[in-house]
Amino acid sequence: MDFISILSIFVMACFVGYYVVWSVTPALHTPLMAVTNAISSVIIVGALIAAAAGGSPTAKWLGLVAVALASVNIFGGFAVTARMLAMYKKKER
Amino acid sequence: MEHTAPSAWVMLAYLISGVFFILALRGLSSPATSQSGNRFGMAGMLIAVVTTLITHDVASLPEIIGAIAIGGGIGWVTARKIAMTDMPQLVAAFHSLVGMAAVLVAAAAFLNPGAFGILGADGLINPVSRVEMGLGIAIGAITFSGSVIAFLKLAGKMSGAPILLPLRHVINLGTLAAILGLIGYFTVDQSPWIFWTITALAFLIGFLLIIPIGGADMPVVVSMLNSYSGWAAAAMGFTLHNTAMIITGALVGSSGAILSYIMCKAMNRSFISVIAGGFGAEAAASSGEAKEQRPWKRGSAEDAAYMMQQAESVIIVPGYGMAVAQAQHILREMADVLKKQGVSVKYAIHPVAGRMPGHMNVLLAEASVPYDEVFELEDINSEFAQADVAFIIGANDVVNPAAKTDKSSPIYGMPVFDVDKAKTVFFVKRSMGGVGYAGVDNDVFYMDQTMMLLADAKKMCEDIVKALQH
């Protein structure tokens, strides 16, 4: 992919993000933060590439540490979001 | 070279993962759809991880699985155990990890560019990739050190008071300019010292940016760091030409930016003034002067119980003090007793109540308060004029009428609840001494219809429940 295609995806995604986030109900802003935190750990993709590659042992170890850090976030972020969301209940009638 | 252009299928997989992340946020538009949204997020992450693993020659699968297991285990246990009141510092800690991960990935890409497919024909890293890497590591490092400070302040391991260095604006702007200048120079000279200097300066500025910001502004800081962690991921997505990372980065970046904007607006402060810092310090200085004694009325738990039983409608305004006292459960019990006796009970939540956006909603949800009894500022504010009782527990600045009338007040212009229009006001507060985070006196204390309930919030609610059941 050339730079301009990537930039286009990025700009479009910013707009999508803008509208999607404004539609999030304020009551769920804390879960929003927790879940954005979890998904921003998609940076694990880069960490996996570094950890998987041969060639530079230092880069591999940096990658492995990054994989571990991102995993804390992925599991922790999604789990704590799920825990919070499960608490939101409607009025019993 | 082992790296070849990814096939269309791989790109499609990352695109699906990105779309799933959009759906994860979309689900949060209502509590009813939020849980399925969260599952979309998990699925998107799984797709991204599996795609990466099967499309690269993995030389070290056991190590990778080990790293995921260790990290995942720590994350999972933490998420299970954490108290809901501690959510702000948990989120800050998680942000720091994203920042650090971005730093490590950028460093690995610099040390082993071949693996990331960013080498040019001349054997050097592509100049565009160098800018992206430079930005990625800089934003990652700022996110890391900034979040560590935010974590320490939120967890009470460091004073929430702003720490003001002399010439801090000059130092900060100078450091920022140096980082940008070095990233520019990095495109013509890829010497390691430039890369590592950028990294070191970025760690430093993250630290310098957050130490002057006071406790009351932490919701903005946490949101802002949330945004940065997104931009860091996006920058690395550019380096890796990875759609999932770019989409996610843009989503998270916008999300944090919008939350910061909402928080600033709810405090009537400009983003620049929050970032410039020093809010708590100025206010503390001004509260020292002119402390006249004005008459106020003290009420008892029995008074409160009696008045609320007689009332048709009660609006509860909870604040961070309720969270500190862990009074949310007993508060809900109190509301339950009142509801059984035919009183209409609603909760009113200010956007900056608590230490992060939506914090109070989570705490009430934890105490099994139904979310359709909880209202936002603009939805409920007109109802105070008809309410019989406004029950303020652990909030202060968000009900201060000075924000509407007193131009010299540090909170002037901040949207506040019109509790002064309610027929009776009960104000639960530990003592008459402390006056909120902004450090300003509150006219509501001295109104004719106000009764101060001076006690620990939890104890007071327990006493009211007892009195109600008599």
Image: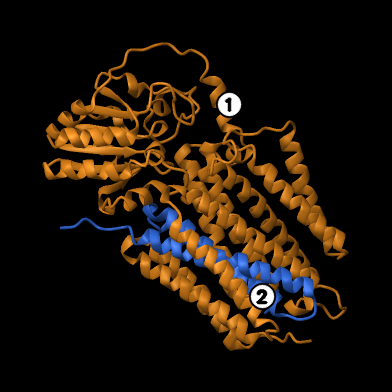
Chain colours: A blue, B orange
Q: Quadrant of the C terminus of chain B?
A: top left
**Mark 2 Cα shell of 10 Å, populated few (<14), some (14-19), many (≥20):** many
Residue B385 in sight from this viewpoint: no
Q: Quadrant of the N terminus of chain B?
A: bottom right
| Secondary element at image label 2 | loop
Question: Residue at 41% of width from left, 66% of height from top?
Answer: B26
The image shows residue B290 at horizontal and vertical percentages of 48, 12
The image shows residue B82 at horizontal and vertical percentages of 45, 54
The mark closer to the camera, 1 or 2, is 1
* Residue position marked by numbered label 2 in the rendering: B241
Q: Is B374 drawn above or below residue B438 in the view shown?
A: below
Residue B136 in sight from this viewpoint: yes
**Left/right of residue B382 with respect to residue B250 in the rendered view:** left
Q: Mark 2 is on which residue type?
A: His
Q: Quadrant of residue B96?
A: bottom right
Chain ID at mark 2: B
Q: Is A70 drawn above or below residue B312 in the view shown?
A: below
**Left/right of residue B102 with respect to residue B305 in the rendered view:** right
The image shows residue B377 at horizontal and vertical percentages of 34, 42
Precedes in sequence: disc 1 or disc 2: 2
Q: Which mark is residue B282?
A: 1
Question: Residue at 44% of width from left, 34% of height from top?
Answer: B414
**Left/right of residue B412 with respect to residue B470 in the rendered view:** right
Is B17 in front, or is B55? B55
Q: Is B418 drawn above or below residue B358 in the view shown?
A: above
**Marks 1 and 2: CB-CB under 8 Å?**
no
Q: Is B100 drawn above or below residue B45 in the view shown?
A: above
Chain ID at mark 1: B
Q: How far is mark 1 from mark 2, CA to CA? A: 47 Å
